[in-house]
Image (cartoon, rainbow, N blue to C red):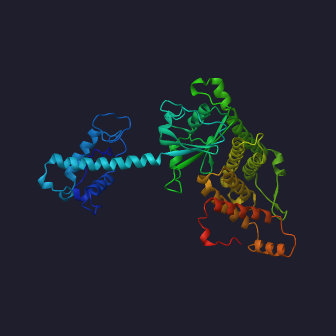
Amino acid sequence: MSSSSGSGNGSLGSPTSVLAGATSSDPKELILAYLRKEKIKLWLPPYYDGNIVGSNRAISGSNDEALQKLAKELLTRLPSTAIENRDAVDAEKQKEQIYYAILELQSHAVQRLIEKNTVDVKILGLAVPLPHDICTTTGPLADWGDSVSIANTQGGKTTLRITNVSANLTVDTFTSDLRSALNVESVRVIWKGKNLSSSSSSDGESVRIRKVLSSGKSTDKKKQCELLCIVSGGSTTPHPASSSSSADTDSAASTERTDQSIIASIRAAARTMQSSSSASQFEITDQSGNLVPMSQSDSASFLTALGLHRLGRTKMDERSSDGSTSSRQDAIGSALVFLLEADAEWSNPALESWKHKTDNYALLQLDIAWQYLRLESLDSLPDAVTRLDIAEAALRKQVHSNFITLALVQAEMNNPIPPLCALFVRLFLLQGIAKKVGRGDHEAEGEQRL
């Protein structure tokens, strides 16, 4: 008998060889051992297809015919002890017992898959309430997944929940649909410290949301994964998606293109400096004012990172004209876009050794962590804490091991302290805020920062 699993190589083998890893006589455990051995995936065709419609299916998308065939196969593969009163029941009833056990396993597997591909989208910067029809089955976001619902709405922060994200949903489609549905000019999407709005795959295509979700898991298993979505440039009244025109679409994407064009121009300017004779005029110094030599190949990435960081800090210092929550979140989101782009530039292997030679990388981590805290995004808190730890490690490599202790002694004696102490004060303050926001998970440890 040949396998129906789709792996298509050879016979199934004897019950002893197939179920060698099973240590229980429980039918479901033996069936599960068989499925794993033969690499049969009940959540994939031919056993499951969300588009299949049939009157006999037990769960949505379940292919009854393929499951019945699998149950018949298993009837000959399971030991006689796996079926209760096997001698007293006919073969059809035995197959029915196996069939319902497979259905239960399939239902569990599909549910886990749906949970894995379910994501919360926290929308910040909205000036008006969501359109009433945005989450309907015929609404503008209906193609995002099995369903889109409003999970939470409070304090200018709205959370949408996408259940079982569509395999075809890309970041570009996501941002385009949301811009149109909310009538906003810009949508910036952030996932675990990365600006997805500028992301693309190796072949130049927009990244799929499902691939993004599979790249990392939430630290809290009870909490849904969360995309941070910052919108800006919204009108006072949202318009229906059906009334949008090509001119509206071009206008809606203008702010996003502006962000990306600025980032591209900075990178181009850095490359121009690297290849020009003026590149030799670019010099950096350490904390003591001593020149630190840098090759031309390193200088382009370094200048790009500094330029993006500088733009991010400029955005951080901007004040909203109306003082509204949405304007404040827009300013924070805009700053975060440039800061995260700078952080991505620091991941260049050419700058790896410079992360600890200068304090620029540590300062960038402090700025990113601060923007996360200002957004009050608890899902981003682990990333903020990690960045603060990175900043502390980088800053401590810039000074003597007893630097902080000696600075405290000097302060108690009313003597001047080094300017670098201000960075450590800021670091410890942000770490304290992060722990407070995180409900003090390590409060009992009584950790001494000095």
Residue 424 visible: yes
Q: Quadrant of residue 199 in the image?
A: top right
Which residue: 64% across, 72% down? Answer: 446
Q: How many marks?
A: 0
> In terms of depth relative to the viewer, which is nearer, 151 or 290?
151
Residue 40 visible: no
- Relative to residue 237, is residue 328 depicted above or below? below
Q: Quadrant of residue 417 in the image?
A: bottom right
> Where residue 278 sits: x, y (%)?
83, 47
- Relative to residue 288, is residue 95 depicted above or below? above
> In terms of depth relative to the viewer, which is nearer, 402 or 380?
380
Query: As drawn, is 278 to the left or to the right of 157?
Result: right
Query: As drawn, is 139 to the left or to the right of 438?
Result: left
Q: Quadrant of residue 284 in the image?
A: bottom right
> Where residue 380 sits: x, y (%)?
61, 53
Quarter of the C terminus within the rendering: bottom right
Outermost residue, left direction? Answer: 88
> Where residue 304 sits: x, y (%)?
74, 47
> Where residue 106 sits: x, y (%)?
34, 47
> In terms of depth relative to the viewer, which is nearer, 248 or 125?
125
Outermost residue, right direction? Answer: 415
